[in-house]
Image (spheres, helix red, strand yellow):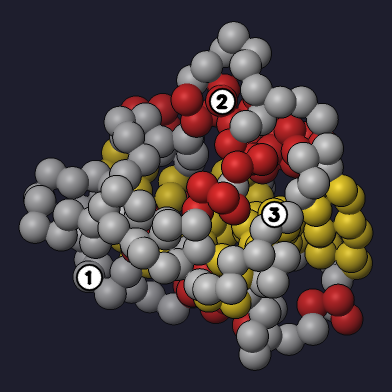
Amino acid sequence: MTRVRMDLFVSLDGYTSTTGRSPENPMGEDWGRLTAAYAATRTFHEQVFGDTTGTGTFGIDDTYAAAFFEGIGAEVMGAAMFGLHSFPDDPNWKGWWGDQPPFGTPVYVLTHTAPRPSIPMAGGTTFHFRSTPIEEVLAEATEAAGGLDVRVGGGIGIARDFLRVDLVDDLHLMVAPIHLGRGTRLWDDLPSLDLTHRVTTEVAESGAIHVTFSR
């Protein structure tokens, strides 16, 4: 049965990177600090950079990185994560994920500017743009997933929307051992997920803490 999965990066004080966004830093100035351990893994090098030489770290971080790519049949993300607003006046802009995005599935981009033409990319990714309620987009993504899971990719606004209405079956948090003190806090005004989901934790060699909520 299709499950709705989400993977997020947060700091020890519960923040995600949303300050200082620009075309050069579409995910915010602190994104590199939050994702350093993940970006260092062998899986990230292979899946995102196409590096098959085995470069990168192994261990617990890499195990979670590999799981991130397994069993996904469709993705949902917000306009900011796609990069829709980075170059709003460029009709040829296809997002900031490159010519071959690392998804390989249909990706549903939630944006108030929909409808827009779908964008097929190399490697099996096709970006579709929707302005319908998240429940309707999730139903469409679930059908497209063909029995595999649907990943909600973010950004943080979309992630909080899905959590607020209890649509997430599996949430994985990679908690970086850093203190940001700025950005958007994940848990503000959200329900207590520990009351509805089973919680497990694991500390990686990098010092990152992997927290999972599953029902």
Image vertical order of residue 182 relative to residue 174, above or below: below
Image vertical order of residue 61 relative to residue 143, above or below: above
With 179 as the anchor, is 140 left or right in this view? left
Q: Position of residue 134 (x, y in %)?
A: 49, 74
Q: Secondary structure at mark 1?
A: loop
Q: Residue furthest top?
A: 53
Give residue 142's quadrant in the image.
bottom right
Residues at marks 1 and 2 touching, judged by CB atoms closer than 8 Å: no
Q: Say which of marks 2 and 3 sits in front.
A: 3
- Circle 1 crowding by C-alpha within 10 Å: few under 14, some 14–19, many from 20: few
Q: What residue sits right under mark 2 in the picture?
A: 45
Q: Which residue is more in the foreground, 44 or 13?
A: 13
Q: What residue sits right under mark 1 in the picture?
A: 113
Q: What residue sits right under mark 3 in the picture?
A: 176
Inspect the image, locate mark 2, and give the three-letter code of the amino acid beneath it: His
Q: Where is the N terminus found, in terms of image quarters?
A: bottom right
Give residue 163's quadrant in the image.
bottom right
- Circle 2 crowding by C-alpha within 10 Å: few under 14, some 14–19, many from 20: some
The residue under the point 29% across, 58% down is: 22
Tell me the distance, in whole angstroms, between the alpha carbons under discs 2 and 3: 19 Å
The residue under the point 31% across, 54% down is: 83
